[in-house]
Image: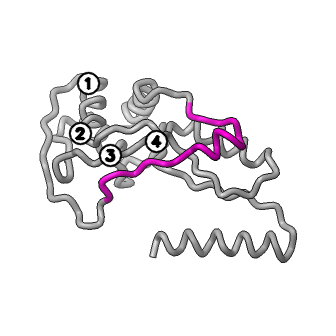
Amino acid sequence: CYDEGKRMSESLCFDYLRTYKVDISIARIFNTYGPRMVPNDGRVISNFICQALSHRPLTIYGDGSQIRSFCYIDDLINGLVSLMDLNFPGPVNLGNSTEYSILEISKLIINQIGFNNKLINMPLPDDDPRRRNPDISLAKEKLKWEPKIDISLGLAKTISYFKKII
């Protein structure tokens, strides 16, 4: 129902565009991370950081080979502003096309925090996709936008934030 809800919302926005000539901009936002994330929101980066800072094992679902891409919040905001400044309704995918396995992300976080946290494997949920990666070619073409912040720098800023609140 989550996917269908998003499709319905986009359809309604386009109906308003056609019927009432209302300006719309539709962004499809992919995995975003950064400071001010909620510690218990269930997202992989915040989960790993909170577990690592608390000296707990990091929970890996399945074998950790699932592929994800992560966009730092500043990059996402720049993409959203670029989309709003352009008279283009979209939809436009905003995210980072650089891929990491969940296992790679866990190791990057452990290395930055500096603790030798263990990993524990839990069963992979049936509906967990093997790969999530946005095609941002339209954002590059229309918005002249692409992410700039490297995962190492983004994680460092995010970890610094979590150190202050935990």
In this picture, residue 88 sits left or right of residue 58: right
Measured as percent of width and height from the top left, residue 15 is found at 75, 75
Mark 2 in CB contact with mark 4 (< 8 angstroms) = no
Q: Amino acid at mark 1?
A: Asn
Which residue occupies 74% across, 58% down?
89
Measured as percent of width and height from the top left, residue 23 is found at 82, 61
* Start-end of magenta stretch: 129-147
In this picture, residue 134 sits left or right of residue 66: right
The residue where tag 4 is placed is 33
Which residue occupies 64% across, 46% down?
138
Q: Nearer the viewer, mark 1 or mark 3?
A: 3
Q: Nearer the viewer, mark 3 or mark 4?
A: 3
* Near-viewer residue (50 or 112): 112
The quarter of the picture where residue 142 lies is top right
Mark 4 in CB contact with mark 1 (< 8 angstroms) = no
In this picture, residue 122 sits left or right of residue 72: left
Marks 2/3: CA distance? 9 Å
* Near-viewer residue (136 or 96): 136
Q: Secondary structure at mark 1?
A: helix
The residue where tag 2 is placed is 103
Marks 1/2: CA distance? 12 Å
The secondary structure making up most of the magenta span is: loop
**1 relative to 109, above or below:** below
User: Which numbered marker is on residue 111?
Assistant: 1
Mark 4 closeness class: few <14, some 14–19, many ≥20 residues within 10 Å: many
Q: In the rendered structure, which disc, 2 or 3, sits on the residue that comes first in sequence?
A: 3
Marks 3/4: CA distance? 16 Å
Q: Amino acid at mark 2?
A: Leu
The residue where tag 3 is placed is 67
* Near-viewer residue (160 or 18): 18
Measured as percent of width and height from the top left, residue 127 is found at 29, 66
